[in-house]
Image (cartoon, rainbow, N blue to C red):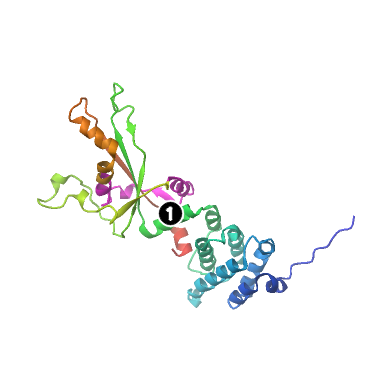
């Protein structure tokens, strides 16, 4: 059987018809970098998986981020890793957010001050827009608050054995504020005429509720990018958020009203968790320059 010989890819020759604009942008940085673009994207361009505009925007963003690196810290020693980053990027280049992410990883791979691990681009490849948005939120505002009302259940002889649990609710910070430790939430310990802690921060000013983000939270938890962080369970926003949740929950307030006339009384407990980035999440944030 006659064998068909496949000639080696001529990267320099392929650049012009396939990604000429990207070549013009990247070649001043490195002909090798321009060549990797050509090698990775020749088939995606041929089958219109990516567009010329998307590649040009990725190349421009990469160039701009690369040019921000001090000359003494520029390195092109990680070309193979850059190839993997580009390969992972193929199916997400239609979104500017992801083009910026991959350009950030490429630029960080050319910065000897940063450590870009190979699995970073794999994490980005698996993200949806919602998950990426939530990761960016953590990168900017640090804390996410989970609040859940629970109560005793008097349908059982032991009312605390099978408690009622309300759906979890999630709140994002709207302002950047340094973490302050308020370990004692008891208003009786406050100075006379001082504002109770739960009244200090207002809804829609300091924090707001985020709906439909639980699946994104679970994704970031599963990838070990965020964690429940007990060190911040005494965050100063918590009293205000817990009061808001309890005061605005119709079912809880109905039970409060019924408590005035019925026995046994329903006893409530408002639980909370605080989520932050993990060390891996912080490393990815740094690699993406968020």
Horizontal and vertical percent position of residue 14: 71, 71
> Do we see residue 78 in this rendering?
no
Horizontal and vertical percent position of residue 42: 68, 65
Q: Which residue is rendered at x = 43% and y = 58% of the image?
A: 136
Asked if residue 84 is among those painted magenta in the image, a careful observer would answer no
Q: Quadrant of the N terminus?
A: bottom right
Q: Which residue is rendered at x = 45% and y = 47% of the image?
A: 221
Residue 259 placement: quadrant? top left
Q: How many numbered markers are drawn?
A: 1
Residue 258 placement: quadrant? top left
The magenta span reads 214-242
Residue 84 placement: quadrant? bottom right
Horizontal and vertical percent position of residue 248: 27, 43
Q: Residues within 10 Å of mark 1 (few under 14, many from 20)?
A: some
Please name whichever residue, 46 or 118, is drawn nearer the observer in this view of the structure: 46
Q: Is residue 121 left or right of residue 160?
A: right
Classify 23 as above or below 184: below
Q: Which residue is rendered at x = 36% and y = 39% of the image?
A: 167
Which residue was labeled with disc 1?
Answer: 134
Element marked by disc 1: helix
């Amino acid at each position: 059987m006659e064998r068909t010989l496949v000639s080696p890819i001529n990267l320099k020759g392929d650049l012009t018809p396939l990604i000429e604009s990207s070549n013009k942008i990247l070649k001043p940085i490195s002909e090798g970098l321009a060549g990797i673009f050509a090698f990775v994207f020749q088939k995606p361009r041929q089958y219109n998986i990516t567009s010329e505009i998307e590649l040009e925007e990725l190349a421009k963003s990469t160039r701009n981020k690369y040019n921000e690196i001090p000359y003494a810290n520029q390195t092109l020693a990680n070309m193979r890793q850059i190839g993997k980053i580009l390969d992972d990027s193929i199916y997400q280049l239609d979104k500017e957010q992801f083009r910026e992410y991959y350009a950030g990883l490429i630029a960080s791979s050319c910065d000897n001050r940063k450590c870009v691990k190979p699995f970073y681009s794999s994490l980005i490849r698996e993200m949806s827009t919602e998950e990426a948005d939530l990761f960016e939120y953590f990168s900017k505002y640090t804390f996410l608050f989970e609040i859940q009302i629970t109560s005793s259940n008097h349908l059982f002889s032991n009312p605390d054995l099978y408690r009622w649990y309300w759906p979890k609710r999630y709140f994002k910070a709207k302002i950047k504020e340094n973490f302050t430790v308020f370990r004692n939430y008891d208003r009786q310990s406050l100075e006379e005429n001082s504002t109770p802690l739960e009244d200090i921060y207002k809804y829609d000013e300091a924090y707001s509720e985020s709906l439909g983000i639980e699946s994104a939270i679970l994704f970031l938890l599963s990838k070990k990018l965020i964690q429940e962080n007990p060190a911040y369970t005494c965050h100063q926003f918590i009293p205000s958020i817990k009061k808001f949740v309890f005061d605005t929950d119709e079912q809880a307030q109905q039970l409060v009203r019924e408590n005035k006339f019925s026995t046994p009384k329903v006893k409530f407990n408002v639980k909370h968790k605080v989520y932050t980035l993990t060390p891996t999440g912080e490393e990815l944030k740094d690699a993406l320059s968020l």
